[in-house]
Amino acid sequence: MALGSTRTASASAESSGQNHRADIQGLRAIAVVVVMLFHAGLPVPGGFVGVDIFFVISGFVITAMLAREWARSGAINFQRFYARRFRRLTPALALLVAVTMVISAILQSPLGAQQIAAKTGLGAILITANIVIARTTGGYFDAPAAANPLLNTWSLSVEEQFYLIFPLVLAIAWWLARRGRRTAWAPVLLVGLVGAISLGIALLQATGHHVPVMPQWLGGFYGPASRAWEFAAGALLALFAGRLAPWVTRGRGLALGVVGLIGLAVSLWFVTAETPWPGPLTLIPVIGTMALLAAGLGERNAITATLGLRPFVLIGDTSYSLYLWHWPFVVFAVLLWPHTPGIAVIAVVASILPAAISYRWVEQPIRALRNLSRRQMVVLVTATLVPPIALAVGLLVASNNGFWNARVQQFVASVAPMHAGNAAGCNTSTPPSAPRAKDCRWNAAMTGTPVYLIGDSHADHFSEAVIEATAQSNHPLTIATANSCPFIDVHLKSRANPRSPCRPFVQETLAWLGTQPPGIVLVASSSTYWDNPVFSAGSTQQNMTNEQPSKNAFLESGLTSTVEQLQAAGHDVVLVQDVPFFTSPNSSDPEQFSALDIARGADLTVQMPVESANEVQKSARDAISRVADATGATVLDLRDHFCPAGICTTQLGDTYLYRDSGHISIAASKDLGQEFAAALNGR
């Protein structure tokens, strides 16, 4: 009988064993453990591949389950399938979301963290968490991700999106397969086609290419379009299980198991956060998982016997609850005790208890319900979905309104708004020569010497100060800044954005300034490029390095070149030293304060000696001073404002000085207007 027929589907189903076969549970145990180790901060750099293991297992198990049903009845009962998926996944998830909303309301900041948690909670319940996270939290390895207590729900939404569509694909394929010999291979061909397209999308995006006509949220790390091939890989294995089973002898099964374990081990130790993912190397854990699944199709061997041991099976049984609970525990524990050594490990271990409770009294009892009437199912769905949705909506509305507390509302209003340059669209990678940069001019009718504020977001956060200073002194002003892009004539890239448009922005802006009336160019940038190994610099793309002495030499020579080019065009140059940067155990980020802290009037001030700030930023500060001495440029150092009497502070009077961990607030920027005016007039 041809592959895809009812008989073959039955053979495949029988050969693949039961849904909860011991060695599959053991493989689930490996997946959840490596993810937990990764999130605990232990040295398992590729631990996030545990999610890829889950995806392949899901494709295999669901296809095998549907194959058995098709073999028995010649149809798929979609109502029963989705009801089972709901009972299996949603109640435990709903409990987690509800608890997380309550804790977020108490512990997290109303400056974005609570809003992101609430939106992610709604997304998790409505099967769109991956889309919400992509649009709000950003990249999985970016700093904001560490503060989202429901970040891990992205993979659950991808899996549930797979469950929504894939059974229909299989039903169509099996229906076609029984129409005749010409369509007998329809299941394999259709699943293979879906997998091939998805893999192609993943590989294209991993190499930096854009897929035309496809929304951005469909692809990338969180996208179902770039992840479907992992499910398809497991599904194809299930479709071929009947033919493979007789071939998998004990020896061959052992060999497959060894190959699979080696593939997973390679993934765990050699894949890192910098590896394009999903991408070419994702094939390693996917193929490794397929090999381990295939090893269990035939005779029992040492690998499958080990995976079937009771400890592995126990962890595998509870893997869903363990996956749900461990990450919120890590986020909240780090928030409460940020400087406690090993706190993430402690949090992961502590999360085992609520995971076990959820498994024993929520996941298992509801999953075991059978033969519910339509009315009973409606009651179950309503009772499951309404509480977390209500709590998430409540948290979102409350945090957006400052919990209707005057202190919270005032604090949020003082630090949350974007700076004037950013709000006007001037803090992009678009050079001022571009048409839309016409909106980035202030005081256009004034007749004094033109002023140009140029740099990265640390130039943008001086927008209010420079706008006020130029308005007082009759100067027309142009602002052109770009995030993570210092105004330095050098090749620069970061691990987070290796294809940054920074270099063209700098070159085109320098060329534009060369055509403008001579004026005063204020150059301001973050000091982080000089001492952070995430950034590499070089005089060419070929000699770029993140080794600090060499990198700093390139940055200094590039800054010198920038100043000299501006001076050759007739401009005066003012180099602005970066504002003090608060480092661990001190933090200037207002998001460290919960709504409760703010509402009860807690002291939010953080202080440190000016010597500590100067030491952290020594490389950049010294280089700017040397460039100024060599070129005759002026230096504007704002240390005295932020560090009166030698003590740097995050709050002066009623003004909280910082918008986040590196940028000053609008109120702080406005207070600097006179200092910039003095610099412009006395340059």
Image (cartoon, rainbow, N blue to C red):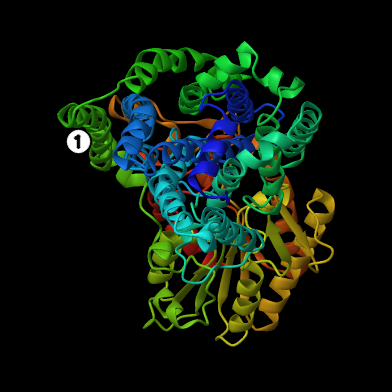
Q: Residue at x 33, y 26 (%)?
A: 91
**Relative to residue 215, is residue 230 depicted above or below?**
above
Whether 480 is drawn above or below 551: the answer is below
- Along the line of sight, which residue is nearer the eye, 642 or 678? 642
The kind of secondary structure element at disc 1 is helix
What residue is disc 1 on? 404
The percent position of residue 576, horizontal first and vertical second, equals 60, 59
Residue at 70%, 35% in the rendered image? 246
State the residue in front, 381 or 336: 381
Counting from the top left corner in percent of width and height, residue 254 is at: 78, 28
- Which of the 4 image quarters holds residue 77? top left
| In-front residue for pair 39/63 | 63
- Please name whichever residue, 664 or 221, is drawn nearer the observer in this view of the structure: 221
- Kind of residue sitting beneath label 1: Trp
**Residue drawn at point x = 56 percent, y = 61 percent:** 197
Q: Is residue 461 visible?
A: no
Image position of 168 (left or right of 186): left
Q: Is residue 306 left or right of residue 61?
A: right
On-image quarter of the C terminus: bottom right
- Answer above or below: position of 285 versus 373: below
How far from the left and from the top, in percent, is residue 108? 39, 31
